[in-house]
Amino acid sequence: AQSVTQPDIHITVSEGASLELRCNYSYGATPYLFWYVQSPGQGLQLLLKYFSGDTLVQGIKGFEAEFKRSQSSFNLRKPSVHWSDAAEYFCAVGEMGGGFKTIFGAGTRLFVKA
Amino acid sequence: GAVVSQHPSRVICKSGTSVKIECRSLDFQATTMFWYRQFPKQSLMLMATSNEGSKATYEQGVEKDKFLINHASLTLSTLTVTSAHPEDSSFYICSAGDRGVNSYEQYFGPGTRLTVT
């Protein structure tokens, strides 16, 4: 069965510093990969997705992620973090087969310090 | 992107009563809708997949008689928590799927906070 692992429960970075959130997946075929962000008490907002093609994906709010098949990873990066980026980040893998199902990682809470 | 709404955003009910949560896709037709449950500081757990005009597919461990799902139209799915108990208190999030030829988009609602007293 497919699964998603986000090794870091929480991360703290200084405002203006770079950020990398890790995500590893387990899936037999080429996965559909997503990163979502959730602010407290809110729903999820899609940051970016990978279906095929260029393995470096650009998203909203200055985020990017790189799909590395050899490492089964889809890490999220941002060169300079803003205080408003503090939130919960979820990596997810989707499978299409009969229907569509999205499996979420446990999430990584990002704290930004001044 | 497409917009998915949920109503209500927050509800408090007494133990033993039933609560209905609505999920609407506002500007597209969603043949598939999903219901998730999220406990505090945890990830989203898929409860069921709802296809328009057919019975929902529930994930293992989710009681179908407890969590009734109806997907009567291409823009509306409802989740009814029957005979609610305090342990049903949670954040419920729906999403609607929009499938293309080689892609898939899933749009999430803002969530409904259910508190059972």
Image: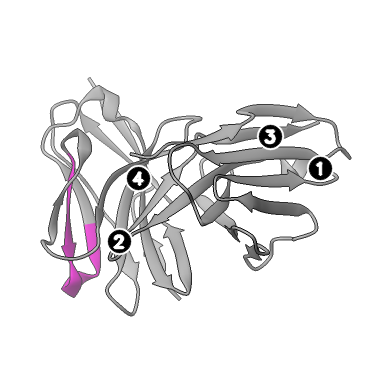
> Do tag 4 and tag 2 residues touch (Cβ < 8 Å)?
no
Q: Secondary structure at mark 4?
A: strand
Query: Does label 2 lie on the same chain as label 4?
Result: no
Q: Secondary structure at mark 1?
A: loop
Query: Does label 1 lie on the same chain as label 4?
Result: no
Specify the segment rendered in magenta: A63-74
Q: Residue furthest right?
A: B16
Q: Chain of mark 1?
A: B
Side of A67 where A106 appears, left or right:
right
Residue A33 falls inside the magenta stretch: no
Q: Which residue is mark 3?
A: B114
Quarter of the rendering containing residue A62 = top left
Q: Which residue is mark 2?
A: B103
Q: Chain of mark 3?
A: B
In the depicted structure, whether residue B22 falls above or below residue A107: above
Amino acid residing under circle 3: Leu
Front one among A112 and B8:
B8
Amino acid residing under circle 2: Ser
Query: Does label 2 lie on the same chain as label 1?
Result: yes
Mark toward the start of the polypeptide (3 vs 1) = 1
Question: Is there any visible trace of residue B40 in the rendered image?
Answer: no
Distance (Cα) linking label 1 and label 2: 37 Å
Mark toward the start of the polypeptide (1 vs 2) = 1
Q: Residue at x 18, y 25 (%)?
A: A15
Front one among B26 and A73:
B26
Quarter of the rendering containing residue A54 = bottom left
Q: Which residue is mark 1?
A: B84
Query: Does label 3 lie on the same chain as label 4?
Result: no
